[in-house]
Amino acid sequence: MPPFGLLVYTVKSAIQDIDPTMNVMNIFKSSIPYWIIMLIAIALIFRLPEIATVLPNALFP
């Protein structure tokens, strides 16, 4: 996973003109659903590793 903190500060500086009231904590809270989805995906790949090989096997038979 990328350095998440650096990305949060990048998002904050990018939206500063659009919403000056947005702070770093709101950005972190807004990212929680995406973290949950990533953790579910990692758990699925760990539990069912053939999921990770379906697409490469389909593209490169």
Image (cartoon, rainbow, N blue to C red):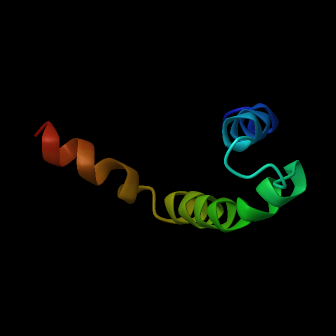
User: Which residue: 58% across, 57% down?
Assistant: 42
Work out whether residue 38 or residue 27 is closer to the camera in this orientation and state it. 27
User: What is the residue that sits farthest to the left in this orientation?
Assistant: 61
User: Which residue: 60% across, 58% down?
Assistant: 38
Counting every numbered tag in the picture gives 0
Work out whether residue 12 or residue 16 is closer to the camera in this orientation and state it. 16
In terms of image quadrants, where is residue 51? bottom left
Locate residue 56 relative to residue 5 in the image: left or right.
left
Judge whether 20 appears above or below 37 on screen.
Answer: above
**Residue 16 at x, y = what percent?**
75, 41
Work out whether residue 61 or residue 23 is closer to the camera in this orientation and state it. 23
User: Which residue: 20% across, 45% down?
Assistant: 57
Name the quarter where the C terminus is drawn. Answer: top left
**Residue 36 at x, y = what percent?**
67, 67
Judge whether 4 appears above or below 47 on screen.
Answer: above
Work out whether residue 58 or residue 17 is closer to the camera in this orientation and state it. 17
Locate residue 20 relative to residue 10 in the image: left or right.
right
Locate residue 22 relative to residue 2 in the image: left or right.
right
**Residue 43 at x, y = what percent?**
60, 63
Name the quarter where the N terminus is drawn. Answer: top right
In terms of image quadrants, where is residue 14? top right
**Residue 23 at x, y = what percent?**
87, 51
